[in-house]
Image (spheres, rainbow, N blue to C red):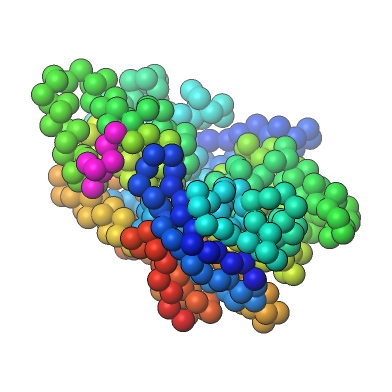
Amino acid sequence: MIVIRDMSYSWGQDKPLFEHLDITISANKSILLTGDNGAGKSTLLRLIIGALQPNSGSITYNEIDTYRPQCPLFAEAFYLSQNTTENLVGISPFEDLSIWLMAQPPIVERHELEPLLDSFGVADLAHQPIAHLSTGEKRLVSLCMLPQLMHKYWILDEPFAGLDAINRKRLLELIIAKQKLHRGLILVSHDVDTLTHLMDETWEIRDRSLSRSL
Amino acid sequence: MLQIIDLAVSFSSPVEGDSSAQIFRNLSFDFEPGNIYAIRGSNGSGKTTLLNTLANIIPEHIKAEKYGHVYWNGILLNDTPLKEMYHYVSYQMADPDHQIFFPTIESEIIYAPENLGLSHDAIETRLEASLQRFQLSSIRSKDAAKLSVGQKKIVLFAVLNALDSPIILLDEPSSGLSGTSLRMLTEWLLELKASGKLIIIADHKSEILALADHSIDMDRLQGQGL
């Protein structure tokens, strides 16, 4: 359970994005986060994963502030930024996935890496430089680890952006499979029509606050 | 009219032993002003490559083998240096971070009309119109680099609007836009069309594809002519 209590946040001297926000996120619920451009959706995800620290109030997981390195959320969650280049650190897709070989406890083995790229149809790009991939292809590579991470809490910022119809369907199927396992996720998307029926809850950021509909 | 004749683009593969990748070849097409053209296709089918080719980013900035001819009203655009292309083409790229440089939204918008050598008053008029058109007036002195991805896209639409070039290329303009912003985009596109602009859009969203008068399917083009 992630607990947000009396949390306020603003970028520098700007108007606050959130004021006195109180909300609890249960680890087995799927949540769609929506809101106008600039409302603070990406910022809220970064606050939750602990990449940002609230100006006041707190965001805790197991009663530890998420921005502290010792918070276990960092190990138990998987965060994908909206900016695909932030998600990919390897020179090639294969090398990027190889970083997971260092995960503790181990999640994959070396011979399993290349087949992972099949899950989003990009196996033929395994050894291409990531810099040569299109925006959509980079997004697909960044999603390829998801089937191995069904046990983690997903925090996904616009994962559907730029996906073609086949890959959209692949990601939707993964999300449905994850819900059957009762493992939670929070994702940002503007595709409210499709996702709102699928997800347990829809949250909208409006006027520095969150409204939720079940 | 924008006319492309026997256009072909291929990248030489960086991986040893791989043959070069042909993105498309023998592509011939006439684009008429006052129309919206959608470039459709699966991820990696070459939508961005086609836009980059029309904008001359290929091959001047991104190295590739490029063959064929691109004419705008009889002017051969192939050999036009990138720095001169703004007379003909404005281009919103998929990643807004590639295109935002200035410390404020205002200065970002002003840069394009300044390059056109317009008078101070004309620049002011275009700036105010663009700020108002895209509801940016209240945040005009904010640093565009610190905005969210969706807001950066809107700033780029405002830049393109101020540049007022006859050909407008948009790469995934709808991705990351909320419902309100998407409506703002579609209204703007219909206005551009009505004012006789030639608009070429690569996108996946049905609301955008529905606006197109014609579409080019990159999946059907792979390795063959149109």
Q: Nearer the viewer, residue B19 or B15?
A: B15
Q: Nearer the viewer, residue B173 or A1?
A: A1
Residue pictured at 67% horizontal, 44% vertical: A88
Residue found farthest to the left: B121
Q: Residue B201 at what x, y percent from top left?
A: 37, 48
Q: Residue A169 at what x, y percent from top left?
A: 57, 70
- Position of B13 with respect to B135 (left or right) is right
Q: Nearer the viewer, residue A184 or B216?
A: A184
Quadrant for the N terminus of chain A, please: bottom right
How many numbered discs sit on the rendered protein? 0
Q: Quadrant of residue B52?
A: top left
Q: Quadrant of residue B82?
A: top left
Residue A27 vs B136, above or below: the answer is below
Q: Residue B126 at what x, y percent from top left?
A: 17, 33
Residue A16 visible in the shown view: yes
Residue pictured at 22% horizontal, 55% vertical: B187
Residue pictured at 44% horizontal, 43% vertical: A11
Residue A80 vs B154, above or below: the answer is below
Residue A71 vs B127, above or below: the answer is below
Q: Residue A195 at what x, y percent from top left?
A: 48, 73
Residue B198 visible in the shown view: no
Q: Which residues are magenta?
A: B135-141
In the image, residue B178 lies in the stretch drawn in magenta = no
Q: Quadrant of residue B217?
A: bottom left
- Position of A177 with respect to B108 (left or right) is right
Residue B78 vs A117, above or below: the answer is above
- Position of A153 with respect to B107 (left or right) is right
Residue pictured at 43% horizontal, 74% vertical: A212
